[in-house]
Image (cartoon, helix red, strand yellow):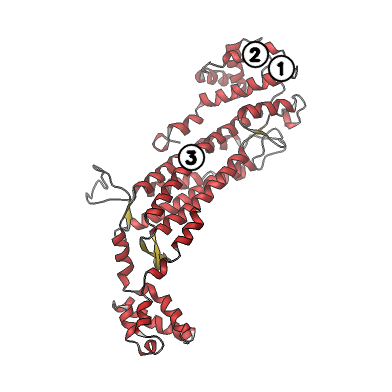
Amino acid sequence: MIPRYSRPEMTAIWEPATKFRIWYEIEAHAGDAMADLGVIPRENADAVWKAKDVEFDVARIDEIEAVTKHDVIAFLTHLAEHVGSDEARFVHQGMTSSDVLDTTFNVQLTRAADILIADMERVLAALKARAIEHKDTVRIGRSHGIHAEPTTMGLTFARFYAEMDRGLARLRAAREEIATGAISGAVGTFANIDPAVEEHVCAKMGLTPETISTQVIPRDRHAMFFATLGVIASSMENIATEIRHMQRTEVLEAEEFFSKGQKGSSAMPHKRNPVLTENLTGLARLVRMSVVPAMENVTLWHERDISHSSVERAIGPDTTVTLDFALNRLAGVIEKLVIYPETMLNNMNKFRGLVMSQRVLLALTQAGVSREDAYRLVQRNAMKVWEQGADFKTELLADPEVTAALTPDQIEEKFDLGYHTKHVDTIFARVFG
């Protein structure tokens, strides 16, 4: 998490001051619930709320922790400095540190998920707008990086939309799965705290009570959350890679917007490089880097250990901050992407009709030629295009074995571009409804 790849709304979630504010709210709400149950005096619970407008001193908490070697105890000591040691004597009653730490972490992750959901919605809006704009803009489809058959730029955007829409559905499910809290005490048995306290705190913090916790919330929930972010990052990279390919000099079907005054190279003034999508490729790697550690965090000793703690202190902020930045960058790239329809058409025609080979193959078989012979006839003429720069249709019309099965008009008809785009509306209806 570095400022270069950070946005303030997301980084604020992970600031120490925010964390301590959430800790405070959990403790205060727990006190209210315990007072309602008659476990602690109401005046003591109310006294904790005297600190509701306090800006907790992060440096002071760090100073106390340097002695206690325990972050939650350091915070509780600092809280008592504000509300009074006698008034604060029932704070944290029956609770354990993980009740505060795990519940807080899940509050932060759900808040982060809400920002990421908004980010995804922006990306989807951009993809949909460009898909509709270029629904009928014909370009060559490629397999193995080689010309295959015609498609449209709109379909390219539409398939990315569908992929990101699946990602959004997964993210919403992951948010729901991570939005649990636990106030269950040591080893999760509620021996020293009533389950009603957990229910009250979770309701106040926008969470649901964990079905069964030990001394920690089960980490399979977190593994699922970070795995989902990793899949979204991979989809982001998928889009970025396609744009990078389209910007190659030999292709140049689209390129990132190049602003006035922008420089492409310190050495070569002519350069206009796909720096943003290259950056997105790298950021996707950083997001995915959290997935395996999150998976490994699922395995903990008995009712708890802290082998997961150091991992989550890093991957929680780093992954959500990075993905938030990257998704907003991706949306901007798509919104401002410069597209060149004429170049797309020129690229498709570069091999003089070769991309219509399947239509000719199918026509020959429908005319009674065996598939093996039809393939041989079409490939024989296609190779002349590859090797000699010939025109595919001209070669077919000059091949007596081909014209014995197909008339010139039938051959001509097989080179109609509209044949390949006739179902675009059907596909759009499936994607966009």
Q: Nearer the viewer, residue 298 or 151?
A: 151
Three-letter amino acid code of the residue under disc 1: Ala
Tell me the element at label 2: helix
Name the residue located 48 percent from the left edge and 61 percent from the top edge: 426
Q: Is residue 216 visible?
A: yes
Q: Nearer the viewer, residue 100 or 420?
A: 420
Disc sitting over residue 46 in the figure: 2
Q: Residue 143, image x and y in percent?
A: 43, 66
Residues at circles 1 and 3 in contact by the CB criterion of under 8 Å = no
Name the residue located 40 percent from the left edge and 81 percent from the top edge: 378
Q: Which residue is mark 1?
A: 35
Q: Is residue 291 visible?
A: no
Query: Where on the picture, by quarter, is residue 328?
Result: top left
Look at the picture and state if 417 lies above or below 32.
below
Query: Where on the picture, by quarter, is residue 309?
Result: top right
- Name the quadrant of the N terminus: top left
- Could you tell me how far apart the alpha carbons at marks 2 and 1 are, in whole angstroms? 9 Å
Query: Where on the picture, by quarter, is residue 51?
Result: top right
Residues at circles 2 and 1 in contact by the CB criterion of under 8 Å = yes
Disc sitting over residue 118 in the figure: 3
Look at the picture and state if 184 lies above or below 65.
below
